[in-house]
Image (spheres, rainbow, N blue to C red):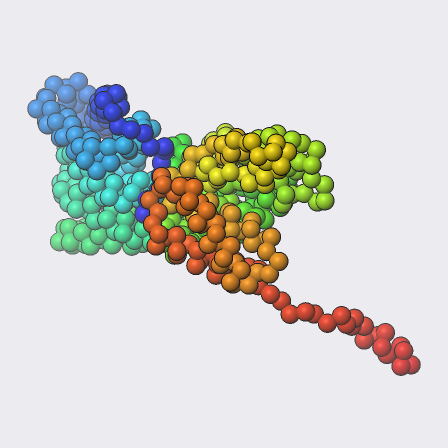
Amino acid sequence: MMYSETTESKKFGKRECAKSIVLFFFNYAVFLGLILFFIFFNTLNAPEEDVSFGVYLRTNISTLGYLAASLFVLFVVIYFYYIFEDREFLATMKNIELIFCLLGVSLVVCYFFGVFFNVYARPSALLALLALLLLRRRDAILLNIVFALMMFSIDHFSNYNPGEAYATATDCYPVIAFSEGMIGIFVGSKVKTRLRSFLTGFAICIPVLIMASCIEYDKGSGIVWPLIYGLEGGVLSAVFFMALLPVFEVTFNCVTDYRLRELTDHDASLMRELREKAMGTFNHCIVVAHLAEACAIALNEDTALARAAAYYHDVGKLRQPEYFTENQSGYNPHNELSPELSVDIIRSHAKDGYDLIRSKRLPKILADVAVQHHGTMPIKYFYAKALKMSDGEVNIENFSYPGPKPQTKIAAIIMIADASEAISRTLPERTPEKVENAVRDIIEERMDLDQFDECDITMKDLTTIKETIVSCLTGVYHSRIQYPKLKIKRKNEEEEKKA
């Protein structure tokens, strides 16, 4: 899980730099407005009748200036972190909005839980859990620290007469929030199901339970309620995380393991349509997904992403399913078409798949694999047919896929798995030796045609892919014993004959 792509990567030039700075300043102004709202809300609930919003602002100018300055420094820290760690991330404005939406939502939720319930009841690990799934682990750690410091500044410099108990608890809040968030990050990174995500909440509450016990022990008011609130805060972190994650996934078109699993459900919209209109292609995608997932495990790649990419790599065939062999039942419409027209129909499925996936607002990385999984390979069947009809004077580029070539290791895996599954069905004997020779030929042909030049795949990776696919295919298409042609009669019939 450790990394989930958000949106497409762009080059970070001067224009993108200027736009990102403007967007950071805009969000800084929004956060200042949010803090002013917190102050206004505090003055409405102040015990003294003569305290108003205007009076508080006039009498606390220096304090508010410090709060604004500390907030600005934290924004600068976030910006320079991405400048040095992943500046392409800042080139997409939606990524920046994702960061500040995560921070803003977490601040609002935790602030009001502290006001209406208790400081210990705050779901302080909410931001860390969301950032872990929607961004990366390193990003989640940074934002967790920033959130703890922001919340600390807001507690101390926007509250009017907070009271001794509240002040004491907020003094320790940075440690509580940081600890809860870090536990959420390291425990949550191993979680693969929503039930385990909920159970993570019980691990998250450990720091606040320890801190609450130490702080409240000698106050004479009892520690039962602080401990209950602390347990509530940990569990609510997990509950709010599960509730808000789908909202962020859809709004910002993020890729997470949870969403990928939902997309590979056979009842997902495109999967159901593929099953109903192109059953042959659907079955082909299932086997390719099995191969791709095994290869991803062997190469330590994202298995959920490999499986989802394989499920969707051929959805472009939905446009004209009857023109693809696996969906035909005897009649082949290509027999009535010229090779040029046939090849246009066949190669268009890659671009059609890209357009269909994007039109459904599914993750772009799935669309990228759909358009890249054939690279610039020639469509040899129709190229050979055209050669026969034109005495050998044919431009092979007119009978090749337009590309682009695979840009990622996942796309390269899908390219090899797709061709391997298809050719394995044509083998009269699917012995391990025959399958291995076929897969080796597929990989060598694509290497000769420079199909892997634009992705970071190595010879060692290709060898691992070959061995994995051969092992899987010989398992999928294993031999069976010949069943005897013997008809077993029912017991009643035998008894009637004897009678």
- Left or right? Give the position of 321 relative to 489: left
> Where, by quadrant of the figure, is residue 87 drawn?
top left
For the C terminus, which image quadrant? Answer: bottom right
- Left or right? Give the position of 129 relative to 445: left
> Front-most of 207 and 374?
374
- Left or right? Give the position of 332 relative to 391: right
Q: Position of residue 187 (x, y in %)?
A: 30, 53
| Residue at figure coordinates x 51%, y 62% from the top left | 433
Q: Is residue 300 above or below residue 142?
A: below
> Front-most of 207 and 116?
207
Q: Residue furthest right?
A: 499
| Residue at figure coordinates x 15%, y 54% from the top left | 214
Q: Is residue 175 visible?
A: yes
Q: Is residue 482 above or below residue 346?
A: below
All told, the count of numbered labels is 0
> Where, by quadrant of the figure, is residue 61 drawn?
top left
| Residue at figure coordinates x 51%, y 54% from the top left | 438
> Front-most of 461 and 377?
377
| Residue at figure coordinates x 49%, y 45% from the top left | 310
> Front-most of 155 and 338?
338
Q: Position of residue 94 (x, y in %)?
A: 33, 28
Q: Position of residue 248 (x, y in %)?
A: 38, 35
